[in-house]
Amino acid sequence: MSTINFDLSHSIRFNCWKHHKEFLIRQILTLEPGDKVLFENFLFHVKEIGNSKTDLYTGLLSPSEISDMTAKILENFNIKDKNTFKDWLSTKGKEYKELKLDDNSKWILRFGTEENKYVHIHPSRDSLHTIRISASTLKTTIVALAFSRLFKFNKINLNLINKVRKEILFLAPLKSIKPPCSVINLIEEFEIYKVSQILID
């Protein structure tokens, strides 16, 4: 189970559990059926998602590629340490900068609080390859998929989703998962149900 920053190099902090779809898919697929210890570790990291709206990157760049591209851009601006980074952020009276990476996705850079991870990045709200969702929708989706894999359920239905929401995430139950349902839409976006042969009922 990978850490929040996916062991990124450079001075970059990127919450992959909150902002990177393919990273989350890999974490779910590492779960072995019946391995409750690994599932508990998975749930521990789910807390990193928080409770607010989030922007989830759905593109093809890996966390390492995002980190490397960002570091290269900063290098081109002659940013070598946290002091030059902080000064650069505030050049236009703002506390952030927006960068565009090779796949035309846009990313927000802010000053981080960690000593060695002072470049805090996350997808821009209006970026390509990004969807804006609630934290509860994201957590419900990935825990429902993980739960289905762990206990070999071959269907994701309202009962399973509400079991996850009430007993694991301590969220209010859903009344329906009929369209339009943000949880079902995101489950379909993840496409893990195809890999794991899970049906959406």
Image: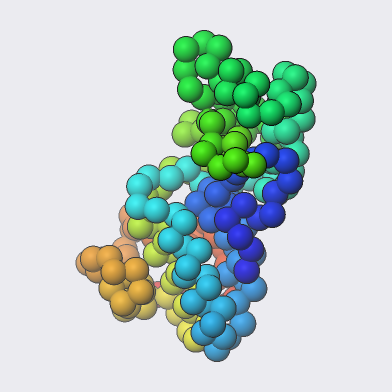
Count the numbered circles shown.
Answer: 0
Relative side of 97 to 11, left or right: left
Picture layout, residue 157 above or below residue 9: below
Residue 119: give x, y in percent of width and height.
Answer: 60, 35
Q: For the point 58% across and 52% down, which residue is it?
A: 16
The quadrant of the rendering that contains the N terminus is bottom right
The quadrant of the rendering that contains the C terminus is bottom left
**Picture colour scheme:** rainbow
Picture layout, residue 44 above or below residue 89: below
Q: Quadrant of residue 116?
A: top right
Residue 30: give x, y in percent of width and height.
Answer: 64, 73
Q: Quadrant of residue 97?
A: top right
Asked whether residue 76 is in view, the answer is yes
Residue 167: give x, y in percent of width and height.
Answer: 31, 77
Relative side of 66 to 94, left or right: right
Towards the viewer: 82 or 184: 82
Q: For the point 40% across and 47% down, which residue is it?
A: 133
Identity of the residue furthest to the top in this view = 92
Q: For the point 67% across and 39% down, which residue is it?
A: 11
Asked whether residue 73 is in view, the answer is no
Towards the viewer: 94 or 155: 94
Q: For the point 72% across and 41% down, which residue is it?
A: 10
Residue 162: give x, y in percent of width and height.
Answer: 30, 73
